[in-house]
Image (cartoon, rainbow, N blue to C red):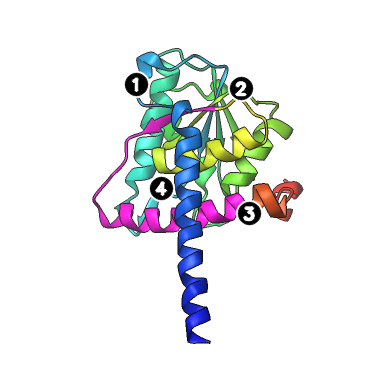
Amino acid sequence: MIRWIAVAFILSIAGIISIDMTMTQQTSAFIYTDLRKLPSKKTALLLGTTKSIAKDKKNYFYIYRIRAAAALFKAGKVKTILVSGDNGSQHSNETAAMKKDLIDAGVPEKHIVVDNAGFRTFDSITRAKEVFKAEDYIIVSQKFHLERALFIARKKKQKAIGFAAKDIEGTKAAYKMRFREYLARTKAFLDIYLLNPRLSSQAVQQ
């Protein structure tokens, strides 16, 4: 029994690593880090995250995503920014915070569209096309997140590309997010190839 458990564990780890590598390889050609080389699109999809990771502690993943999205708009690369996140908590309204900070960064309010039902990346990508009629657009997030988001978008026949916001490599927060990403990628892989879920019940109700 112990031997079989060990074998199953090893195979599971190998599968997770394989999925991780597959997503990186299949999406690398669609991720841009140089704003000058980034093609122009009508819409940018800004994927949400919490503004603070603890009381009075900034979330730099959030800060750098806001800066990247604002830079896209100011450079004339997009005309509209679709902010997608979770507004379900009274303590953390991702979309309201993103909208306010984009405005503070110089993006006019009329160019910002809000999706309050981006409870997970799968929902944000699916709703971008089904609700907001965007399927040829730029996704904004950190590279590790873009790879999963683009994998989902491309498997859904969308023409999305990604613009990588600055990362915070080598930090405790980065290692924590990277570990979480292994699990999230496995879930995304199963969603696409096996589970084929629709929008989450919360997202459908929005």
Number of other residues with Cα within 10 Å of mark 3, as a class: few under 14, some 14 to 19, many 20 or more:
some
Residue at 40% x, 36% y is: 65
N-terminal label among 2 and 4: 4
Q: Is mark 2 on a helix, strand or loop?
A: loop
N-terminal label among 2 and 3: 2
Q: Nearer the viewer, residue 41 or 29?
A: 29
Where 20 sits versus 151, above or below? below
Determine which residue is flagged by label 1: 34
Q: What is the three-letter code of the residue carrying label 3?
A: Leu
- Measure the C-alpha gap from mark 2 to mark 3: 24 Å
Determine which residue is flagged by label 3: 190
Q: What is the three-letter code of the residue carrying label 4?
A: Lys
- Measure the C-alpha gap from mark 1 to mark 4: 25 Å
Q: What is the three-letter code of the residue carrying label 1?
A: Asp
Q: Is the magenta region chiefly helix, strand or loop?
A: helix
Q: Does the stretch in magenta take in 183? A: yes
Where 70 sits versus 24, above or below? above
Whether pointer 3 and pointer 1 mark residues with C-beta atoms closer than 8 Å, the reply is: no
Determine which residue is flagged by label 4: 51
Residue at 51% x, 65% y is: 12
